[in-house]
Image (cartoon, rainbow, N blue to C red):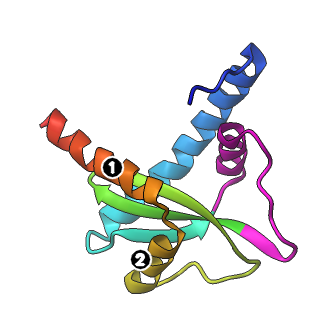
Amino acid sequence: MTIQLTRTQRRQMQKLADRVDRVTQADRLFFERRPERQHRVRLASHAEIKQNEFMEGKPQAVPPDCRIFTIVRNIAPGVRLRLFTCGLEGAETDLPEVTASAIFEAAATPRTWEIEAAMRKAPEARA
């Protein structure tokens, strides 16, 4: 599926991409500091939410008293997969690996596993 964006939308996406890049660099640092970890749960940034809405073509529905969280899976050094899910406002994000992993598994779809498989092959192709 190809998404057709207007020139204005492309500019907005680039601005969002620059902001999302800063957020994902924090994910990189998280996993560099914690090499035993493969999963992280954190609040989604405004830029990530807006970028996801562009990709989905519609606003993200968020129930009252909820927030959007990002679940990050560290597949390999420099290769991470992000999923988005709703959770209760004020939910804890300083979670142990087993809990963060379980949240990722619960949020994953068959398409998630296809994307992960393709991403796992990508570093092998660069090696």
The kind of residue on which mark 2 rests is Ser
**In the displayed structure image, the side of residue 112 where residue 90 appears, left or right:** right
Q: Which is more toward the observer, 8 or 2? A: 2
Left or right, 50 with reference to 32: right
User: In the image, is residue 68 part of the stretch drawn in magenta?
Assistant: no
Q: Which residue is mark 2?
A: 101
Q: Residue at point 72% right, 28% down?
A: 12
Labels 1 and 2: the sequence-earlier one: 1
Q: Quadrant of residue 85?
A: bottom right
Q: Quadrant of the C terminus?
A: top left
Label 1: element kind: strand
The residue range painted magenta reads: 44-67
Question: Residue 83: x and y, percent?
Answer: 53, 59
- Crowd rating for badge 1 (residues with CA inside 10 Å; few <14, some 14–19, many 20+): some
Query: Circle 2 — which element?
Result: helix
Residue pointed to by mark 1: 79
Image side of residue 84 versus residue 7, left or right: left
Relative to 33, say whether 26 is above or below. Answer: above
Is label 1 or label 2 in front? Answer: 2
Can you name the residue that lies furthest to the right here?
64
Mark 1 in CB contact with mark 2 (< 8 angstroms)? no
Nearest to the observer: residue 88 or residue 118: 118
Q: Position of residue 54 (x, y in %)?
A: 71, 37
Where does the image place residue 64, in percent across and percent down from the top left? 87, 73
Residue at the far left in the pictured view: 127
Whole-number angstrom distance, CA of label 1 to CA of label 2: 16 Å
Mark 1 is on which residue type? Answer: Val
* Residue sitting at x 39%, y 81%: 97
